[in-house]
Image (cartoon, rainbow, N blue to C red):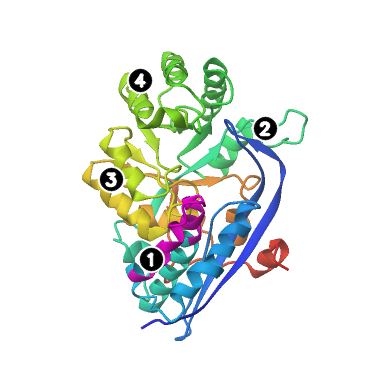
Amino acid sequence: MLTIEAIETIPLRIPLRFTYRGSYYRMRNRCTIITRIRTKEGVLGEAYNADEDEPLQSAIRTIVHDELAPALIGQDAMAVERCWERMLPATFDQLRPRWYAMQAIACVDTAIWDAVGKAVGQPLWRLWGGYSDRVPMIGIGGYYVPEDGAAAGNEIEDEIDFFRVEHGMVGMKFKIGAVPPEDDAARLRRARRHSGDDFLFVVDANQGYTVAEALEFVDRIRAEGVELRWFEEPTRWHGDFRSLRDVRLRGNVNVAAGQSEHSRVGMREMMVAGAIDVSNYDASWGGGPTEWRRVATLASAFDLQCGHHEEAQVGSHLLASISHGTFVEAFSPARDPIFWGMLSNRPALVDGQFHLPDGPGLGWVLDEDFIERYRVDR
């Protein structure tokens, strides 16, 4: 028995040096929510999820405290499936976007799993399947950054040097989709020239292209001898899964998607449509590790691979636990000071591999000084 007595949240917000721009979005702050589950038996579950800024950050915390906590206080955290089902009614309000509640559920579900791992004395990567104790890491970069000098030291070449030379990552997820395909192709060629041929690339259009533009991009880089490990979210949302399927089949390129889905239902339909080769579902946006593992089982049934959208602190455990995992992802410190600054025991990469901690649960030690500096709930 592991009786839940209290649920606490701490919101963090860190201003970034400049505005990062993807296809149709901009990011000025890096945010997260630390969730703590306190139990009668003295076990503390702790996790951080949900990289949302205001006003959504407050909305997620309100759901946690007003709807999820009352459903869980007094429950046995070891009964993870029952706890998850008790949180599900928060998604039933049809006048509120369901993914708000799914992010709130993710915060609590991840902390519950951390408590379970600590209670049984096992790291979550082992508890969830134990396929490996490590997973290869790729960096995320290639953003459209200001040209006024604000982004000095964070240009494409600087990012590649940080990912490959300083940390030995095996590749890079490169942002595209905000400019015409010929310009994005030139940007990727520039990256390839600097990185060399033994550094893999995936590209992420963040739903920025039409099908025709995505196919043009593939043709242009292929003509230059640049091959992709996969093409992530190549097409706009209103094309539904058929656009992803068209790029995959007509472009003869691996397609990844899933971060924009918030349940296994959407992922199931994406797989049935033959739209993807790689499921890139996000446990922090879509109901936590409990739902991600359901999606991973679906992916296995369709003979697909799994990635995890960002959130290496959780995604690394999930990907290492299964046989069909791919790469864990990390931004540069300028884009994600939380991963690089708050995890006191973050391991150095060895031969491109991110080694999971042996400590129970998630195994991370969070820097309390960092938390106090950037918490916004005082």
Q: Which residues are magenta?
A: 82-104
Q: Which mark is residue 84?
A: 1
Image quadrant where residue 231 sits:
top left
Q: Which mark is residue 299?
A: 3
Query: Quick one: 221 or 374, which is closer to the camera?
Result: 374
- x, y percentage for residue 343? 57, 61
- Secondary structure beneath dot 3 equals helix
- x, y percentage for residue 10? 62, 66
Query: Quick one: 177 or 219, which is closer to the camera?
Result: 177
Which sits earlier in the primary sequence, circle 4 or circle 1?
A: 1
- x, y percentage for residue 83? 38, 70
Which sits earlier in the primary sequence, circle 2 or circle 1?
A: 1
Q: Amino acid at mark 1?
A: Trp
Q: Amino acid at mark 2?
A: Val
Of the 4 image quadrants, the one containing the C terminus is bottom right
Which sits earlier in the primary sequence, circle 3 or circle 1?
A: 1
Q: Which residue is mark 2?
A: 145
Mark 3, Cα crowd under 10 Å, few <14 / some 14-19 / many 20+, is many
Marks 2 and 1 sit apart, C-alpha to C-alpha, by 40 Å
Marks 4 and 1 sit apart, C-alpha to C-alpha, by 40 Å
Q: Which residue is mark 4?
A: 251
